[in-house]
Amino acid sequence: MISLAILISGRGSNMESILRAIKKNRIPVKPAIVISNKPDAKGLKIAHKLGVPTAIVESGGQKGGSWEYDKKLVSTLEENGVTPSNGLVCLAGFMRIMSPEFIRKYRGRILNIHPAILPSFPGLHSQRQALEYGVKYSGCTVHFVDEGVDTGPILLQAVVKVHENDTEETLSKRILRQEHKIYPEAVRLFAEGRIKTTGRKTTVAYESRPLKK
Ligand code: GAR
C-alpha cells in the first residue's frame, strides 16, 4: 500500500478533504504523516484530531528550493515510511518551492493542487491574477511536480465560472470547493495505480462501473 505524506503551510482544508476520504475507505493509502513548515499551521490541529501523525520541519528564513531544507524533509518522510519506492507526497498549500534534488528523488510521486487552470496564472495569488485578467472561467489543477513552478504534467482539472461581482475571496471559495473534490480523487487514482504518464501527458484508466460519489 502507498504511504502518503501531506505537506502544508496553513489552513489545511485540502489535507482535510484527503484525510476524510481516506477515513471513509475511499482511498487505499496509509496516511503516514502530515508535515508543516510552519509551527502554527491550523491544519496541524485538524490532522491531530483525525489521528494522523504530524511533524514540523521549520523553514524559518531558509529560501525555497534549497536542498539543505529539503534534506530534512526527506529524513522526516523516510522516518515515517514515505520512501521513493512506496510513497506519495501531496503538497496541499505548502508554500515553498521544492529543490531539484527533492524532485529527482521522489519524481512521479509528488502532487500539487493549484487554484487556477494551468498553465494560466501559475505562482502566487492565482485567483487575483484571474480576476485582474478578466477571464470568464477559472478553476483548479492537480499536477505532478517537476522542476518548474506549477509546470508538471496535469492530472485533473475542474472549472468554475467567474461572476461579474466576484472578489478574490468569493472566487477563491468557489474554486476551493472544487479543489476538495479533485484532490482526493487524484490521490485515489494514484493509489489505485491508474495513472500513466508519457512526457507531459497523463492518462487515467477508469473502471467501467460509475465512480462512487
Ligand atoms: C489552496 O487554495 C491551494 O490551491 C493553494 O493554497 C490554498 C491552500 O489552502 N495553493 C497554492 O496557491 C499553491 N501555489 P488549504 O491550506 O486550505 O488547503
Image: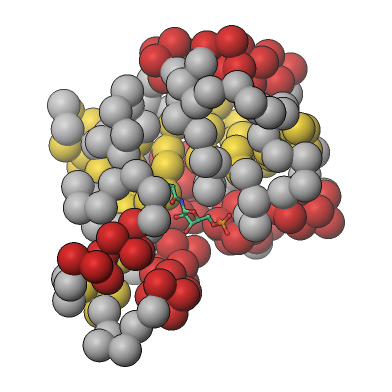
Judge by depth and name the residue closer to the eye, 206 or 10: 10
- Residue at (17% x, 72% y) in the render: 134
Residue at the image point whose x is 16% and y is 26% from the top: 199
Quadrant including the N terminus: top right
Residue 179, x across and y down, in percent: 43, 62
Where residue 185 sits in the image (x, y, percent)? Answer: 43, 56
Residue at left 24%, top 57%? Answer: 117
Q: Is there any visible trace of residue 171 in the rendered image?
A: yes
* Residue 34, picture quadrant: top right
Q: Quadrant of residue 139?
A: bottom left
Q: Position of residue 75 (x, y in %)?
A: 68, 14
- Residue 17 lies, with reference to residue 28, above or below; the image says below
The quarter of the image holding the C terminus is: bottom left
Residue 27 to residue 72: above or below: below
Q: Nearer the viewer, residue 162 or 15?
A: 162
In the image: residue 108, left or right of residue 62: left
In this image, 50 relative to 64: left or right? right
- Determine if residue 22 is in view: no
Front in this rendered view, residue 37 or 83 = 37
Q: How is the image coloured?
A: secondary structure
On screen, residue 24 above or below 105: below
Q: Nearer the viewer, residue 15 or 130?
A: 130
Give the total of numbered labels. Answer: 0
Q: Residue at x 73, y 55 (%)?
A: 42
